[in-house]
Amino acid sequence: MDPTPRFWSMAGIGALLAVLGVVFARPEPVVGAAGVGAIVLSRQYAFLRDIRQLDDDISVEMTTDARFVNRDDRMEITLTVSVPSRTPIPLSVTAGMPVIAGSVDRDDRTVILDAGDESATTTFSAEWPVVGRTTIPEPTVSVVDTYGMFTESVQRGSETGVQVEPRQPRNIHVGEGGDAVAAPFGGHRTDQYGQGTDPAELREYMPGDSVSNIDWKATARLAYPHVRQYEVESDRQTVLVMDHRSRMGEGPEGETKFDYLREVALTIATAAESADDPLGFYAVGDKGLTVEERPSTASDHYRDVQTLLHDLEPTTSSAVSRGQLQTGRMLAARRTATTIENDDSAFGRMLRPYLSTAEQYVRKIDDNPLFGTMHTYINRLGSDHWVLLFTDDSDRAGLRETIRVARSNGNHVVCFLSPTVLYETGSLADLDDAYDQYSNFESFRRELARMEQVAAYEVGPGRRLSALLSDDRRR
């Protein structure tokens, strides 16, 4: 309990009356001082009684519309206060805010109940500009006695945890017609028998078979020598072709078409490294090829491809300046330049001028740069490659021709498509129209999947797709 300025005024009046009574030797001022003291004590007692009653009855609840929020997004917070027996004194309840939250006006996050009120609610929104986990502290209940001489502040309710996450793809869906699928990459079966690690079948021993292949347990069980055959595995020559033209930037910040496709590409690159699959990487912007990495199994190569994928962003549709084609060799040169820059030896000083600037360029391809890249560069790789294409469904005619070129020379094509309808702002406001657009996309995806040596998958936010297919439209 804390005294207010009014209390100190009353205390000063009482003290003054007591001093006057002593100075003038009169009982009247002393009686007045005693009366003032009695009033103060009675108000203090009444305030304590009201606080105890209020403490037994008050209920403070703070809820949020989500426990997870993306950076720079807003979260709705609701503060509800109730006193079933009606509050005996005025009170206010204020929601506190953590340091990493944006500023919210105190009045917007305060609930006020006058004497006799039973409940009140307020809802406000807070912005979260900093990534991390934080806690919204317990709300603070403040009460003042009827005469304004005493005040008390206590915390009631409970803390609320909030996780602020960076803007990035979540709940990534890769599938066909709304059904998730898993595409294997790495060690790959050939339907041929020989040296391998995967047991295939058991057969009787024949002259010429290696003794090392005899399955002794099966031989003992079957009373005749049997050999175990293993399925041969081979590596896939995997080539990632990433479309990062301007249209791939459609969607919320951090959750664009490109962001989702990049996550899938990074996963495949990691799988290729684990399986020691030769991995190549090509990226295509609005004006042509921007990254060229021929397939390789060098230890630094996988890291370079992952670095290039992380650094890649959708280009702009305006003229592209020089300086956008990147390769692993350029990354290596950049690392060398950094080393030379810190080398104060005579040799380092001699090489520094040659490495101070990196001349980069863009190879322009007229008309459809994705088609041009496939026609000009992928065909140079030869046959029997797995070409993994990451793009959207905006230019369907151009995509058909691109895939036809990509599967030439006996190549297999796996196409990962971002359905535009899942990324357009407000596209799900009319679910019937959005479902029609998705059905049209699905027909196109199936058309591609029916092409020889082609597989096609949709890539997008799983929650949005689930919302689109959640009702009877799917049937």
Image (tube, rainbow, N blue to C red):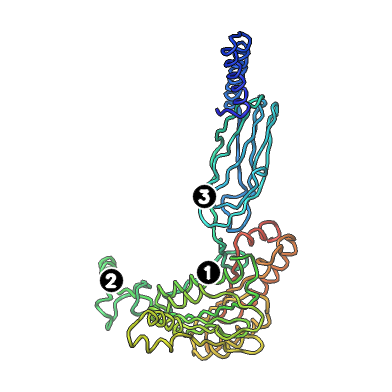
**The N terminus appears in which quarter of the rendering?**
top right
Residue 110 at x, y = what percent? 65, 40
**Quadrant housing the C terminus:** bottom right
Q: Residue at x 52, y 50 (%)?
A: 134
Q: Mark 3 vs mark 2: which is more N-terminal?
A: 3
Give residue 352's position: percent from left, percent from top: 41, 86
Q: Which amino acid type is shown beneath numbered disc 2?
A: Asp
What amino acid is at disc 1?
Answer: Glu
Q: Residues within 10 Å of mark 2 (few under 14, many from 20)?
A: some
In x, y percent, where is residue 140?
Answer: 58, 37
Of discs 3 and 1, which sits in the foreground? Answer: 3
Mark toward the start of the polypeptide (3 vs 1): 3
| Residue 24 or residue 287, whichever sits in front | 24
Which residue is identified by label 3?
134
Q: Residue at x 61, y 73 (%)?
A: 417
Question: What residue would you read off at disc 1?
Answer: 263
